[in-house]
């Protein structure tokens, strides 16, 4: 046991040393081929991601400003971006204080290393933990809402794009979230999933079973007559919002599509991504809608995402770390293209997150 602990400590110390390499105030890490390559491949659009910082970033921003290809709004945003990067790059030292047994210490150190900023990490037992146990369902210090709550807000915005009725299918653990799902819209129904037979459940809630019963009743009136029959699904709602356990999506969505086809718009909660271990597994949700950012989609195209749940967790960690950098650099406002969505930072307010809703298609996997 002692040996195991020592090995972990040695690994942690190695990461600390690596992180300290990125704490030189003049970007000396640029001598690394890895960082040189990353910087050379970085475009003007990539700089809006706030994922790493190099002196050359300022040159790329200025070149875009001088290129006269930006409209009024884009030019305004580019000037804010330049001002933010000037503040971030000019600060000589950042500090991050963690508890020695902080659950996400290793991940944070690796994220610090990737930022390429002079960040010093200090360890203090008395430091209050600023990160929750569950990074997805609980609110992170500095943000207005949790990732789950922001996901509900995005679903509300998508539902509100038309006046169609909608159906909510939910599991027990997500029942508390339903009260925030379109609270002003009374034109919806909800059904709790409590069955292991996805096909039977889908046929029942979409009205297929009822349609088949009507057909049998009609057929019994004249058994000698052959009737063509195609069961019809319900037409009193056109959208289906799904809040289920991660493992339930892989069977529920195909079952719904089997009985309902493309008649309905299927909107998945962010839990649908939590057990995706390879990008191709998203094809199980083809033609449904998911809460997934353009940044994450770009990683999927490059086949870099791996476990999406882990990717989202690292994304929320990275966003918390960025908040510490922005605060210490004295940045007043920023709009960040991040892993979980669009991050809207203001120095005098809590940070907002806008999660986009995108349709899952094979186009996501095309280069």
Image: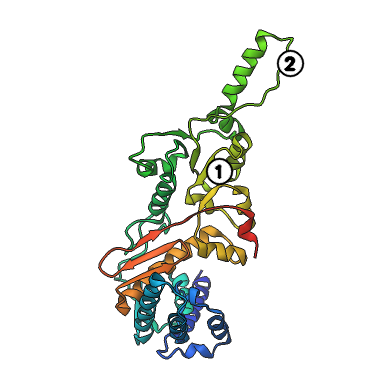
> Residue at 50% of width from left, 73% of height from top?
8
Does the image show residue 185?
Answer: yes
- For the image shown, how many numbered marks are present on the structure? 2
Q: Mark 2, mark 1: which one is toward the viewer?
A: 2
| Residue matched to label 2 | 226
x 60%, y 40%: residue: 262
Q: Position of residue 228 (x, y in %)?
A: 70, 21
- Position of residue 80 measured from the top left corner of the image (x, y, whole percent): 35, 76
Extreme-left residue of the structure: 348
Structural distance between the alpha carbons of marks 2 and 1: 39 Å
* Residue at point 45%, 79% (across, down): 68
Task: Say if mark 2 contacts mark 1, CB within 8 Å.
Answer: no
Q: Residue at x 53, y 79 (%)?
A: 42
Image vertical order of residue 61 relative to residue 241, above or below: below
Q: Earlier in the sequence, mark 2 or mark 1?
A: 2
Compared with 312, 59 (above or below) is below
The quarter of the picture where residue 248 lies is: top right
Residue 216: image location, x then y, percent: 64, 16
Q: Secondary structure at mark 2?
A: loop
- Looking at the picture, how far across and down is residue 344, in whole percent? 36, 65
Question: Which part of the image, by quadrant, shows the C terminus?
Answer: bottom right
Q: Is residue 95 left or right of residue 254?
A: left
Q: Secondary structure at mark 1?
A: helix
Tell me if 124 is positioned left or right of 275 in this view: left
For residue 248, the mark is 1
């Amino acid at each position: 046991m002692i040996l195991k602990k020592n090995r972990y400590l040695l690994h942690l110390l190695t990461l600390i040393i690596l992180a300290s390499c990125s704490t030189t105030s003049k970007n000396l890490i640029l001598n690394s081929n890895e960082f040189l390559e990353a910087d050379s491949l970085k475009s003007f659009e990539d700089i809006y991601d706030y994922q790493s910082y190099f002196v050359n970033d300022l040159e790329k921003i200025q070149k875009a400003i001088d290129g006269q290809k930006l409209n009024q709004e884009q030019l305004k945003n580019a000037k804010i971006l330049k001002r933010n990067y000037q503040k971030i790059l000019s600060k000589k030292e950042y500090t991050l204080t963690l508890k020695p047994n902080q659950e996400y210490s290793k991940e944070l150190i690796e994220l610090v290393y990737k930022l390429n900023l002079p960040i010093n990490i200090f360890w203090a037992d008395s430091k209050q933990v600023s990160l929750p146990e569950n990074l997805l369902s609980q609110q992170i210090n500095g943000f207005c809402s949790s990732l789950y709550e922001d996901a509900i807000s995005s679903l509300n915005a998508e539902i509100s794009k038309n006046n169609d009725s909608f159906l909510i299918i939910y599991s027990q653990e997500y029942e508390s979230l339903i009260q925030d799902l379109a609270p002003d819209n009374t034109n919806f129904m909800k059904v709790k999933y409590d069955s292991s037979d996805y096909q039977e459940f889908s046929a029942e809630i979409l009205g297929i079973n009822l349609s088949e019963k009507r057909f049998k009743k009609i057929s019994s009136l004249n058994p000698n007559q052959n009737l063509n029959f195609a069961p019809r699904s319900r037409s009193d709602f056109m959208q289906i919002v799904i809040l289920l356990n991660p493992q339930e999506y892989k069977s529920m969505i195909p079952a719904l599509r089997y009985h309902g086809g493309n008649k309905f718009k299927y909107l998945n909660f962010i839990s649908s991504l939590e057990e995706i271990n390879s990008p191709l597994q998203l094809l199980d949700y083809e033609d449904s809608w998911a809460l997934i950012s353009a940044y994450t989609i770009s990683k999927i195209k490059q086949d870099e995402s791996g476990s999406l749940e882990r990717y989202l967790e690292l994304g929320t960690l990275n966003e918390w770390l960025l908040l510490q950098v922005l605060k210490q650099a004295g940045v007043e406002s920023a709009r960040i293209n991040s892993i979980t969505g669009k991050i809207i930072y203001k120095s005098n307010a809590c940070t907002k997150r806008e999660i986009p809703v995108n349709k899952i298609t094979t186009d996501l996997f095309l280069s």
